[in-house]
Image (cartoon, rainbow, N blue to C red):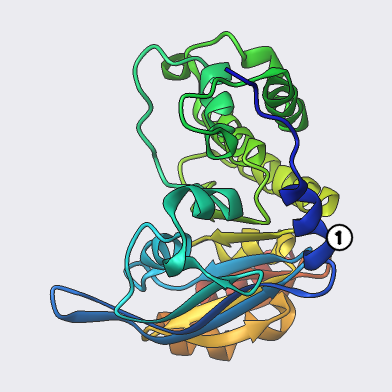
Amino acid sequence: MKSSSHNTFDAGVRDRTTAGQVFNVQNMRFSYNGIPVLSGFDFSAKSGEFVGLVGPNGTGKTTLIRLMSGVLKHDAGVVEILGSRLDQMKPTERARLVSVVPQNPRTPSGLTAWDLVLLGRNPHLRMLQWEGKSDAEIAHSAMVATSTHDLADREMDSLSGGERQRVLIAMALAQQCPVMLLDEPTSNLDIAHQPAIMELLTTLKSRDDGVVVVAMHDLTLAAQYCDRIVVIHEGRNFADGKPQDVLTEEIIQRVYGVQVRVLSHPDTGMPVIVGANSAAQSRRNGL
């Protein structure tokens, strides 16, 4: 069996992504058991963007990630990557265009970190084709980029939450797709590991010409790292723009139904969202 090798797909992706728009969602509609979840959602992303999807629990962030990756079939609307419709592609073709890091994925028992990352090369293999030298090199580079190469021989079940998350990102990186979608990548991590994952995604985004889209519930964390924030409300793109323009007290009150105070981070100047009572207590304490 011949090994796979670097093909012209990756070079072509880079040529086209530098020209502008990579990812486009038009009029996305989806219902679950007759209950509307998304009702006309529009979204697009350009080359090099790191976009955060935020909104209250149950607003459809996870559903949207699944729809944008082709895992779920939408009721209406169009998802395009580099001008091609996702619903008209074969699964292998989709897997060459979009990689996904889901919440709490199950991995087979006994699988090592290296085994999992190497699975990211499967979309680039022909039927009955084994991974070759170039695939191993790509997988190794992905593990180096995510600082997981020293975990290669460890079984996934033995890794910490932060280690597992980095290995999953390495697998997605090994797919070499122009679009990477992540669903709550920091939700199960402690405060020490959350910034590390976001820093990693920022670094990966800066090295590539593709698009990174992250569904998140932590508004402050999203504001510190994402280039753009999309606020989902009532199944639609309610607000879309720079963090400081979108994460305002008025918009958060409207979407989340809670009063907050938006402060400015002393180092980055980006929004820091705190409860109204917490902000008042901080002022009383001279903070």
Q: Nearer the viewer, residue 5 or 49?
A: 5
Name the quadrant containing residue 87: bottom left
Residue shown at 68%/64% (left/top)?
285
Q: Can you name the residue that lies furthest to the left here?
A: 33
Q: Nearer the viewer, residue 76 or 32?
A: 76
**Position of 211 compared to 54: left or right?**
right
Q: Is residue 209 visible?
A: no
Q: Is residue 194 visible?
A: yes
For mark 1, give the secondary structure: loop
**Position of 77 compared to 227: left or right?**
left
In percent of width and height, residue 67 lies at: 40, 66
Quadrant showing the C terminus: bottom right
In percent of width and height, residue 198 lies at: 68, 48
Instruction: Please say if 190 is above or below 147.
Output: below
Q: Which residue is mark 1?
A: 267
Residue type at mark 1 is: Asp
